[in-house]
Image: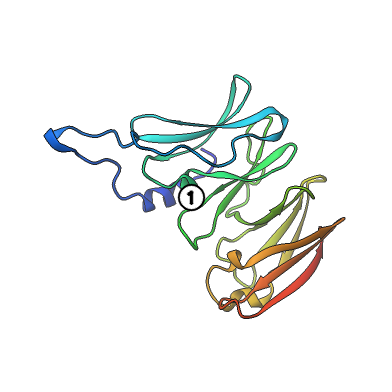
C-alpha cells in the first residue's frame, strides 16, 4: 500500500462495514456501491481501474493488460474520495489524492506511471495544495496542518525541480489553511498564488519562481 496514514484515517472514518437484513441473512455491503465517477483515463495509455468484492472496493493502475499497482482499498459504503482520485495528470506522473471528509487536508502521492512508485514517499506528510497540469506544476505541503516553520513545495514536473517556500502569516488565521490557497495564474516559470484568511474577508497574492 502506498500510504499508511491514509489507511488509519479510513479506518477512523469507517463506522459500520455491513448490515444485517431480515431473515438473518447478511447483506453484501458492496451490492449497491455507486459507479466510480472520477477520472480513469491517464495520458500515455494508462488508466485507473475500479473493482470491488463482497467487502472492499479498490483502485488500481493499469496499462493495457498489465496491472502496475493497487493504489488503494477501503470498505464499501465509504466515499469514493476516501478511496482516492486523480488530482492532476502529468506526462510521466500523476497526483493521486485521498480526501477524508469536508475541510480535512487531502493526502497526495505522486505516482510514477511506469512502475507505480510514489516519488514523494520519503516525505513524512504530504498534502495537496493545488496543481496546474498545462504548466506542469504541482504544489503540496510537507505538513498537513502547517505551522510557521512548515514549507510549501513548488514542484516543476518538467524538470523535477522542487522549490520550498514559507507560508504567509494570513493562512494561520484559522483552520483549513491548505484549502485557502489557490493558483491564480502561471506564466513561464512563475506562479501567482492567492492566500485567504479564515473568514475569507481578506486575501493576498504572492508571485514565486518554480
Q: Residue furthest right?
A: 188
Tell me residue 78's x, y (percent): 39, 46
Q: Residue furthest left?
A: 23
Q: Is residue 167 left or right of residue 192?
A: left
Quadrant showing the C terminus: bottom right
Q: Secondary structure at mark 1?
A: helix
Tell me residue 201's x, y (percent): 61, 80
Tell me residue 77's x, y (percent): 36, 43
What's the coloring here? rainbow
Q: Nearer the viewer, residue 96 or 147?
A: 96
What residue do we see at 48% from left, 50% from top? 5
Tell me residue 106's x, y (percent): 55, 55
Q: How many marks on residues?
A: 1
Relative to 207, say whether 4 is above or below: above
What residue do we see at 56% from left, 44% from top? 85
Q: Label 1 crowding class (10 Å Cα cut-off): few <14, some 14-19, many 20+?
A: few
Q: Nearer the viewer, residue 200 or 125?
A: 200
Relative to 37, say whether 152 is above or below: below
What residue do we see at 65% from left, 30% from top? 46
Q: Nearer the viewer, residue 123 or 88?
A: 88
Q: Is residue 184 left or right of residue 5?
A: right
Q: Nearer the viewer, residue 10 or 184?
A: 184
Residue 45: quarter of image: top right
Q: Residue furthest top?
A: 65
What residue do we see at 47% from left, 44% from top? 80
> For mark 1, what is the residue?
5
Amino acid at each position: 500500500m502506498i500510504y499508511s496514514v491514509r489507511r488509519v484515517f479510513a479506518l477512523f472514518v469507517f463506522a459500520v462495514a455491513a448490515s444485517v437484513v431480515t431473515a438473518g441473512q447478511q447483506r453484501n455491503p458492496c451490492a449497491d456501491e455507486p459507479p466510480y465517477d472520477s477520472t480513469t483515463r491517464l495520458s500515455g495509455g494508462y488508466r485507473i481501474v475500479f473493482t470491488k468484492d463482497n467487502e472492499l472496493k479498490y483502485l488500481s493502475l493499469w496499462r493495457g493488460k498489465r496491472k502496475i499497482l493497487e493504489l488503494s482499498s477501503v470498505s464499501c459504503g465509504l466515499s469514493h474520495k476516501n478511496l482516492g482520485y486523480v488530482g492532476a495528470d502529468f506526462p510521466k506522473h500523476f497526483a493521486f489524492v485521498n480526501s477524508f471528509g469536508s475541510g480535512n487536508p487531502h493526502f497526495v502521492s505522486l505516482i510514477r506511471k511506469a512502475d507505480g512508485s510514489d516519488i514523494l514517499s520519503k516525505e513524512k506528510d504530504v498534502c495537496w495544495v493545488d496543481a496546474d497540469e498545462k504548466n506542469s506544476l504541482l504544489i503540496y505541503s510537507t505538513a498537513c496542518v502547517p505551522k510557521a516553520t512548515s514549507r510549501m513545495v513548488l514542484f516543476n514536473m518538467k524538470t523535477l525541480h522542487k522549490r520550498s517556500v514559507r507560508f504567509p502569516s494570513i493562512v494561520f488565521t484559522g483552520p483549513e489553511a491548505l484549502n485557502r490557497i489557490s493558483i491564480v495564474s502561471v506564466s513561464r516559470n512563475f506562479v501567482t498564488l492567492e492566500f485567504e484568511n479564515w473568514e475569507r474577508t481578506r486575501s493576498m497574492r504572492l508571485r514565486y519562481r518554480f
